[in-house]
Amino acid sequence: MPRPARTVRSRPAHAGRPAGPPGPGRIAAALRARLAEGERGANPVELAVVMPVILVMLFGSIQVAVWFVARSTALNAAQTAVNAQRTIDAGPDAGRERAISFLRQSGDWLVDWEQTGPTCVETATAVTCTVQGRSLSVIPGVSFEVTQTAHGPAERWTTG
């Protein structure tokens, strides 16, 4: 198909831009022109500006993941305490002792839990255990509070 004749309204190509339809040859010509302009030191400067942002995002995402693991550890300890405390023949501190044993075996995902220690409250019909602490810190000075509570019915004899 023949190309239409140029009219007064059509614009000529810019001086630094190759003329013609877009295609692989035109893109390569544009890249050659950009490299010839003298921007050879731009990539290290761009990397130096962007790298701190990338590192903050990386360590921030790791800190959030560590916080989720600490929450899971605290919840598992609280559930273990409830399961130990809710039985009929459980001693007064059976749940607390089981939670302490669990937390000592689980590693350091949850820190400073020893200050308050796991607490269990038992009523005639229910048991509630709470575990508090802080998440392990990946970023210096940054740690999140973690509090998890588990609740369950207490085993008891009832009349039927």
Image (cartoon, helix red, strand yellow):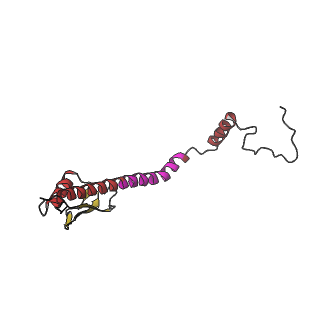
x and y percentages locating residue 27 in the rendered image: 66, 38
Q: Nearer the viewer, residue 147 or 125?
A: 125
- Asked whether 14 or 100 is in front, the reply is 100
Q: Residue 133 occupies which quadrant of the picture?
A: bottom left
Residue 121 image point, x, y percent: 20, 67
Q: Which of 92 and 46 is in front in this view?
A: 92
In this view, 20 is above or below 138: above
Where's the N terminus, which quadrant? Answer: top right
Which residue is at a point 39% across and 55% down the rendered structure image? 60
Q: Which residue is drawn at 55% across and 47% down?
A: 42
Seen from the viewer's position, the closer of residues 124 and 159 is 159
Quadrant where the C terminus sits is: bottom left
Which residue extends farthest top? Answer: 1
**In this figure, what is the number of numbered marks?**
0
On whether residue 53 falls in the magenta region, the answer is yes
Residue 125, percent from left and from top: 21, 65
- Left or right: where 86 falls relative to 3: left
Q: In the rendered structure, does residue 106 fall within the stretch colored magenta? A: no
Please identify the residue farthest to the front as the structure is shown: 160
At 19% from the left and 53% from the top, the residue drawn is 102
Q: Give the range drawn in magenta.
A: 43-64
Q: Image quadrant of residue 5? A: top right
Which quadrant of the view contains residue 87? bottom left
* Residue drawn at point x = 83 percent, y = 46 percent: 10
Instruction: Give the vertical position of 104 relative to 14 (above or below).
Output: below
Q: Where is residue 57 in the image (x, y as percent from the top left)?
A: 43, 53
Q: Is the magenta stretch mostly helix, strand or loop?
A: helix
